[in-house]
Structures are given as C-alpha cells and as structure tokens.
Image (cartoon, rainbow, N blue to C red):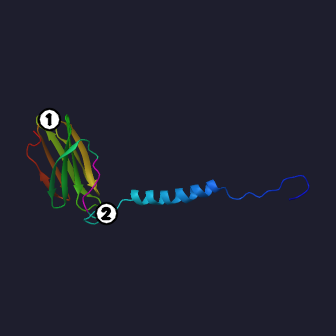
Amino acid sequence: MPTDGLMHTTRAPRPRRRLIARVLVPFLAALALLLTPWPGPGGGATAEAVSVCTGRPAKTYRFATGELRLYRTRHYACAVTVAKRPGAPRPMNVSLQPRGGRAAVKAGRFGRQTGPVTVHALNRCVRAYGSVAGQGRSTGWILC
C-alpha cells in the first residue's frame, strides 16, 4: 500500500452486475424466442390471422381464395374476410346486414384481410357476404 496517506484501490467488477448479466441476458433471449411468431402446421401461407372483431366466433365460411369469419356478442355481429394466401393487394369485400337494417360494407384492395364490419344485431338475424379476388361466399339469414 502507498504511504502517501491516500488510499489507492482498484475496484473489481461488482459481483452483482455480473450476476444480473448472467441471469438477465439468457432470460431476455428466451423471451424473444417465445414471442417470435412461428408459422403454423400448414406452413407460412395460411389464412390464420388475429381477429379484430370482439365476441365469440360464430361461423366460418370457406371458399377458394379465402374465408368469411363471423363473430357474435349479445348485441352485435361482426364479419371479416381473410385471404387464404396473404400477399399483394387484391380486390376484397365484406358485407354484413341485419334483418330490417342497412348493410355495413368494406371493400377495396387489401393484402391480408378486409373488415371488420359490425352491425347491431340484438334479437335479429344477419346475412353476410365476403369475397377475395372475385371469388366469394354469401350466407342466408343466420345467427337468428
């Protein structure tokens, strides 16, 4: 030790920081792996999309280029058209009409899905239509 009256010490890295680095880095790496989206069993080109409609799934109508998904709560019905193979924007359409009311329509060029469209359907039947690239599906009066 020096004799000039001043304490000269060199600090070693704090064990606490090393412990945090040893625990936190692997934890964050594992968390990133868990949160990374992976393709489902059908590969990456499926019509699986997270719905933006609230309520429980009521019906799904499949057609050649996609599917029409209907959801229902106590007071409302909601519809979304989802492309079978997401990609370049193409003409898509979704329509939902309550019995005795006006249809809610969303149409345009979309790559993955069109919608949601929501209508008030308390104690009322609804009919829906969805299409992707000119091919689609229509329902009769349903969810009565």
Q: Which residues are magenta?
A: 46-51
User: Which label is found at residue 9?
Assistant: none
Element on which disc 1 rests: loop
The residue to which callout 1 is attached is: 101
Element on which disc 2 rests: loop
Callout count: 2
Magenta span has 116? no
10 Å neighbourhood of mark 1: few (<14), some, or many (≥20)? few
Query: Residue at 79% across / 56% down in the picture?
Result: 9
- x and y, in percent, of residue 60 in the image: 16, 51
138 left or right of 25? left
Query: Residue at 61% across / 58% down in the picture?
Result: 18
Amino acid at pointer 2: Pro
- x and y, in percent, of residue 20 in the image: 57, 55
39 left or right of 128? right
- x and y, in percent, of residue 31 in the image: 44, 56
Quarter that holds the N terminus: bottom right
Amino acid at pointer 1: Gly
The residue to which callout 2 is attached is: 39
Using the rendered view, name the quadrant where residue 136 is placed. Answer: bottom left
Using the rendered view, name the quadrant where residue 111 is placed. Answer: bottom left
1 left or right of 67? right
Which one is nearer the viewer's eye here, 69 or 55?
Answer: 55
Query: Residue at 17% across / 58% down in the picture?
Result: 134
Of marks 1 and 2, which one's residue comes earlier in the chain? 2
